[in-house]
Image (spheres, grey):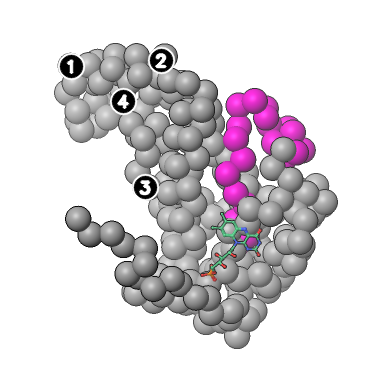
């Protein structure tokens, strides 16, 4: 039995996280709590603060029935989780630049002149950006928010599984999103664990570090 408890113990959150694939299907996460989890996750950093992540919360039996045939070998997570969060990156995230930087001025985080200067530079940067770099950027940013989401979930007493094994080329359209605009990042199942998952090995730390 997994014992993910509501906790602010960072070591417990990080060291105790495991990919959990079986959840108590009777446990639902309220929209208020899910919103709070996502709000905290979106405190993650992003390239020029453009926050390109978008979340599709698949929680109803109807939505899960749409997801199931796209979820390959990950059926149990879909069936038993409180929800599966499909994370997408918005390739049009630049459209929010004015709103984001305007709000920063309104809140006194940034003088108006700085905003104008930054927005001009950012617009220019996006104009010359290739589609490949745009996609790479939204994938990096959305990866950061995904990790933060998994850690915040544990702080709320839930467990997760990052899922890459699904029909990425079909997911947007299946849920009525424009596939040209929304890049699939990953699914994250979330719920109350019914087992403790499996411990997993990490490479020796020296193998992944280079000191210069
Ligand atoms: C991007 C990504 C995709 C993954 N896809 C799957 C998947 O499709 N199915 C699955 O059961 N686990 C999936 N995993 C979980 C990994 O197998 C797991 O994180 C890894 O084995 C380490 O185990 P841990 O998460 O318990 O520490 C994925 C993880 C990541 C980061």
Residue 2 at what x, y percent from top left? Answer: 56, 81
Mark with earlier residue (1, 4): 4
Q: Quadrant of the C terminus?
A: bottom left
Left or right of residue 4, residue 124 in this image:
left
Of residues 14 and 23, the one nearer the viewer is: 14
State yes or no: discs 2 and 4 in contact (Cβ < 8 Å).
no
The answer to whether residue 106 is above or below residue 69 is: above
The span shown in magenta is: 170-190
Residue shown at 37% from the left, 47% from the top:
44
Callout 1: CB less than 8 Å from ligand 1? no
In this view of the protein, can residue 30 be seen by the observer? no
Residue where numbered disc 4 is placed: 101
State yes or no: discs 2 and 1 in contact (Cβ < 8 Å).
no
Mark with earlier residue (3, 1): 3
Residue where numbered disc 2 is placed: 128
Left or right of residue 55, residue 24 in this image:
right
User: What is the spatial separation of the Cα atoms under label 2 and label 4, in whole angstroms?
Assistant: 20 Å
Residue where numbered disc 3 is placed: 43
Secondary structure at numbered mark 1: helix
State yes or no: discs 2 and 3 in contact (Cβ < 8 Å).
no
Badge 4, how many Cα within 10 Å: few under 14, some, many 20+? many
Residue 55 at what x, y percent from top left? Answer: 57, 43
Residue shown at 75% from the left, 54% from the top:
71
Badge 2, how many Cα within 10 Å: few under 14, some, many 20+? few
Of residues 33 and 74, the one nearer the viewer is: 74
Mark with earlier residue (2, 1): 1
User: What is the spatial separation of the Cα atoms under label 2 and label 3, in whole angstroms?
Assistant: 28 Å
């Amino acid at each position: 039995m997994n014992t993910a408890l509501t906790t602010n113990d960072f070591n417990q959150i990080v060291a105790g996280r495991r990919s959990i694939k079986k959840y108590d299907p009777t446990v639902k996460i309220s929209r208020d709590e899910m919103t709070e989890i996502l709000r905290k996750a979106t405190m993650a950093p992003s390239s020029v603060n453009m926050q390109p992540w978008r979340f599709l919360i698949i929680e109803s039996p109807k939505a899960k029935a749409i997801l199931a045939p796209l979820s390959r070998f990950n059926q149990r997570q879909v069936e038993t989780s409180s929800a599966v969060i499909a994370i997408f990156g918005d390739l049009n995230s630049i459209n929010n630049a004015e709103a984001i930087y305007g709000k920063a001025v309104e809140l006194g985080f940034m003088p108006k002149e700085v905003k104008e200067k930054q927005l001009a530079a950012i617009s220019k940067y996006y104009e010359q950006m290739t589609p490949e770099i745009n996609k790479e950027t939204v994938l990096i940013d959305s990866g950061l928010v995904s990790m933060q989401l998994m850690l915040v979930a544990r702080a709320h007493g839930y467990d997760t599984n990052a899922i890459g094994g699904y029909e990425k080329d079909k997911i947007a359209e299946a849920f009525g999103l424009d596939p040209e605009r929304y890049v699939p990042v990953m699914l994250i199942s979330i719920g109350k664990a019914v087992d403790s998952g499996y411990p997993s090995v990490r490479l020796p730390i020296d193998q992944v570090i280079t000191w210069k």
